[in-house]
C-alpha cells in the first residue's frame, strides 16, 4: 500500500496531466472552459476521484459530467501512458462546488464590510 505522500504525488500528477489533456487534446465542446480542481486517489489505487468546475459555474455541470464520462476510456488510456503505474485507477468524475461557495462567501463578506463602514446603515 503506498504512503500518503506517494498517493498525493500520484494525484497531483494525474491532475496536471488531465488538465493538459483537457486543454490540448480533447475536442468535445462540452469540455471547454472547465478545470480540474482536485484529484483524490484511494489507498488501493483502484479509483481516482476527479473534481471539476467550470468558468460559467454550475449551470453546465450535468453536461460537463456527461462529457467526461463519455471521454473516460480515452482519458484513462492516455493518462495510463503518461503516468507510470502498474495498474491505472478508474476515473470517477464529480462536480466541485467549492469555487461557487467561495464566491458566495466573498460576496457576503463584502456586504458585511460595506455595512460596517462609518456612515453606512
Image: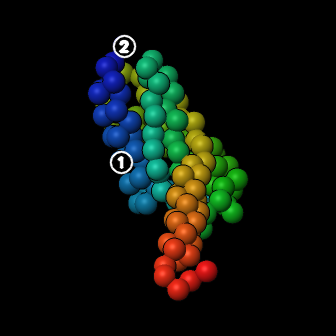
The image shows residue 62 at horizontal and vertical percentages of 70, 53
The image shows residue 25 at horizontal and vertical percentages of 44, 57
3D distance between C-alphas at marks 1 and 2: 23 Å
SS for callout 1: helix
Q: Is residue 10 left or right of residue 112?
A: left
In terms of depth relative to the viewer, which is nearer, 17 or 101? 101
Residue 13: in sight, yes or no? Answer: yes
**Where is 36 relative to 8, above or below?**
below
Q: Is residue 110 left or right of residue 16?
A: right
SS for callout 2: loop
In terms of depth relative to the viewer, which is nearer, 14 or 4? 4
Residue 67: in sight, yes or no? Answer: no
The image shows residue 8 at horizontal and vertical percentages of 34, 32
Residue beneath disc 2:
1
Mark carried by residue 121: none
Q: Residue furthest front?
A: 119
- Which residue is pictured at 48% across the width and 56% down the height? 35
Mark carried by residue 16: 1
Tell me if mark 2 has few (under 14), some (14-19) or many (20+) residues whose alpha carbon lies within 10 angstroms of its own. Answer: few
Find residue 78 and report its image quarter: top left
**Image quarter (top left, top right, bottom left or bottom right) of the N terminus:** top left
In terms of depth relative to the viewer, which is nearer, 95 or 29? 95
Q: Is residue 82 left or right of residue 121?
A: left
Number of numbered labels in the structure image: 2
Q: Is residue 20 left or right of residue 30?
A: left
Mark earlier in primary sequence (1, 2): 2
The image shows residue 3 at horizontal and vertical percentages of 31, 20
**Image quarter (top left, top right, bottom left or bottom right) of the C terminus:** bottom right
Q: Residue furthest top?
A: 1
Contact? badges 1 and 2 (CB < 8 Å): no
Find residue 32 and report its image quarter: bottom right
- Which residue is pictured at 57% across the width and 49% down the height? 96
Amino acid at each position: 500500500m503506498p504512503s500518503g505522500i506517494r498517493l498525493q504525488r500520484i494525484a497531483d500528477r494525474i491532475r496536471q496531466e488531465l488538465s493538459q489533456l483537457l486543454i490540448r487534446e480533447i475536442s468535445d465542446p462540452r469540455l471547454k472552459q472547465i478545470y480540474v480542481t482536485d484529484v483524490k486517489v484511494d489507498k488501493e489505487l483502484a479509483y481516482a476521484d476527479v473534481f471539476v468546475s467550470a468558468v460559467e459555474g454550475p449551470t453546465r455541470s450535468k453536461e460537463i459530467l456527461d462529457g467526461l464520462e463519455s471521454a473516460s476510456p480515452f482519458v484513462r488510456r492516455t493518462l495510463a501512458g503518461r503516468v507510470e503505474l502498474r495498474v491505472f485507477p478508474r476515473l470517477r468524475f464529480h462536480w466541485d462546488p467549492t469555487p461557487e461557495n467561495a464566491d458566495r462567501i466573498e460576496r457576503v463578506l463584502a456586504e458585511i464590510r460595506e455595512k460596517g463602514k462609518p456612515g453606512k446603515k
